[in-house]
Image (tube, grey):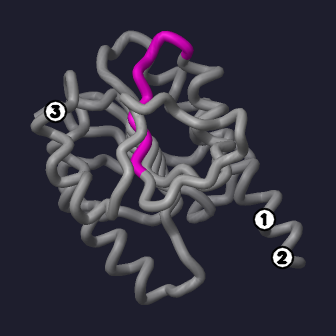
Amino acid sequence: MSRLDSFIRRLEAQRACLDLACAAIAGLPGPVLELGLGNGRTFDHLRERLPDREIFVFEREPRPHPACWPDADHLIIGDLAETLPRAGRWLPAPAALVHADLGTGDAARNARLAAWLAGELPPLVAPGGMVVSDQELSAAPLAPLPPPPAIQPGRYFLYRRRRS
């Protein structure tokens, strides 16, 4: 498969998983956390799908498309290893949805990142809340869910925060 085809499939999987998660949290209060802003595409998609939700965006060096800047109160700038562990102290409520798109081309680095995220995310997510990630996470409080139909398993990952 060409890199272009792989990229297209990843974006299709990302959109399908985000749309499923947005529908799944319809009755659950709480903000959305976007970990990694990049060009701002998924932030823009989330704010369109969830117009009444606060979306807090974590980014080390924001450089999004000009139309995709979060407002200053919802953009947390800095290294995720420093900003995410403190987020539980200031978030208005546990998150109904977390989207993490943080992977790199380095498999070892991605594995370390996924292990760290698996430890940091559960306390920030409301029971019944969703986590959508480009990395596979292994944490007892996060129940893995199958991907939407037509999305190949392992392309993108969905989790629901266990209620107990």
Q: Do the numbered discs 3 and 2 sit on residues whose CB atoms are within 8 Å?
A: no
Q: Quadrant of residue 163?
A: top left
Q: Is residue 54 magenta?
A: yes
Residue 140 forms part of the magenta stretch: no
Question: At which x and y percent is residue 114?
Answer: 35, 69
Q: Kindly identify the amino acid type of the residue bearing the numbered disc 2.
A: Arg
Q: x, y (%) of residue 17?
A: 59, 41
User: Quarter holding the N terminus?
Assistant: bottom right
Residue under label 3, please give it: 90
Give neighbour class at mark 1: few <14, some 14-19, many 20+ (Cα, 10 Å).
Answer: few
Mark 2 = which residue? 3
Q: Residue at x 82, y 58 (%)?
A: 8
The magenta segment is 51-58
Residue located at (64% from left, 48% from top)? 64
| Structural distance between the alpha carbons of marks 1 and 3 | 35 Å
Q: Is residue 69 above or below residue 128?
A: below
The CA span between labels 3 and 2 is 40 Å
User: Residues at badges 1 and 3 in contact (C-beta under 8 Å)?
Assistant: no
Q: Could you say where residue 94 lies in the image, as x and y percent from the top left? A: 21, 29
- The answer to which of 120 and 159 lies nearer the viewer is 120
Question: Can you tell which mark lies on residue 112?
Answer: none
Mark 1 or 3, closer to the camera: 3
In the rendered image, residue 136, in percent from the top left (x then y), is placed at 43, 65
- Say what amino acid the circle numbered 3 marks: Trp
Q: Of the numbered discs in the image, which one, if any, rests on residue 7?
A: 1
> Quadrant where the C terminus lies?
top left
At 20% from the left and 43% from the top, the residue drawn is 87
Could you tell me which secondary element the residue under label 3 belongs to?
A: helix
